[in-house]
Image (cartoon, helix red, strand yellow):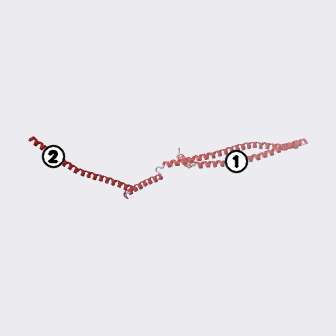
Amino acid sequence: MGLFDRLSRVVRANINDLVSKAEDPEKVLEQAVIDMQEDLVQLRQAVARSIATQKRTEQQYNKNQSEANTWQQRAQLALSKGDENLAREALVRKKSFADTAASLKAQLDQQSNQVTTLKRNLIALESKISEAKTKKDMLRARANAAKANKQLQDSMNNLGTSSAMGAFERMEDKVMQLEAESETAAELGGTGIEQQFAALEAGSGVDDELAAMKAQLAGTSAQTPQLEAADTTSSSKDAVIDAELDELRSQLDN
């Protein structure tokens, strides 16, 4: 393969690729319908011309056939009057018109077939155009649905890195920062009602515990004199017992 053939193939391939990428289904279908309608107009004009030609040929045929019949009758008239030469002349005229009529009849039959074919093609083209319009609307709807679906898929694929999601993430961080700042300000800016009650409750607990300790100390102090009194009483009893023992020893000795 020569260099120019290879270059030509590359150029054609690139052109076809560009054309394929540039093709919009909706526009291509619309243009196809327009082209078909232009063909329909041309076909209708062709049918109209064929019908007009057929009518002219038919008129010429009828005229020549009528002339042939007329000269046939004249030939018969001349022959009935005994004028054979005139009758012969009439038959010559009759033959000329009859030959022309026969030629026109062949053309008329051919034109009639052409008109019939053109009318059949015209009806078929009208049916195709109607079908193409219906199909165009259907394909356009499918193309629009496919485009919308593709855009949706592209949006879904790009959702994680899109600027919209980035904005949401930034705003979420900002809200969290504001919440943290608010909590810090509440801690540093003084105590609220909850903190005040908590302080009172804590203070009451300390006071109660202090009062309990005081009461315990007071009870211990009250028990100490009783113990001392008990010790004194016990000592007195021991002295009495010792005295009684001494007395018994004395009696035994005596």
* Nearer the observer, 246 or 161: 246
Residue 211 drawn above or below residue 106: below
Q: Decide: marks 2, 1 in contact (CB < 8 A)?
A: no
Place residue 123 in its image quadrant.
Answer: top right
Residue 195, image x and y in percent? 37, 55
Q: Is residue 202 left or right of residue 125?
A: left
Report the residue marked by disc 2: 240
Q: Earlier in the sequence, mark 2 or mark 1?
A: 1
Residue 41, image x and y in percent? 68, 49
Is disc 2 surrounded by few (<14), some (14 to 19) or many (20+) residues within 10 Å?
Answer: few
Residue 17 visible in the displayed image: no
Residue under the point 19% across and 48% down: 233
* Amino acid at the residue labelled 2: Val
Residue under the point 10% across and 42% down: 251
Residue sticking out furthest to the right: 81
Residue 72, image x and y in percent? 85, 42
Q: In this view, does 148 lie to the left or right of 245?
A: right
* Amino acid at the residue labelled 1: Arg
Residue 154, image x and y in percent? 50, 48
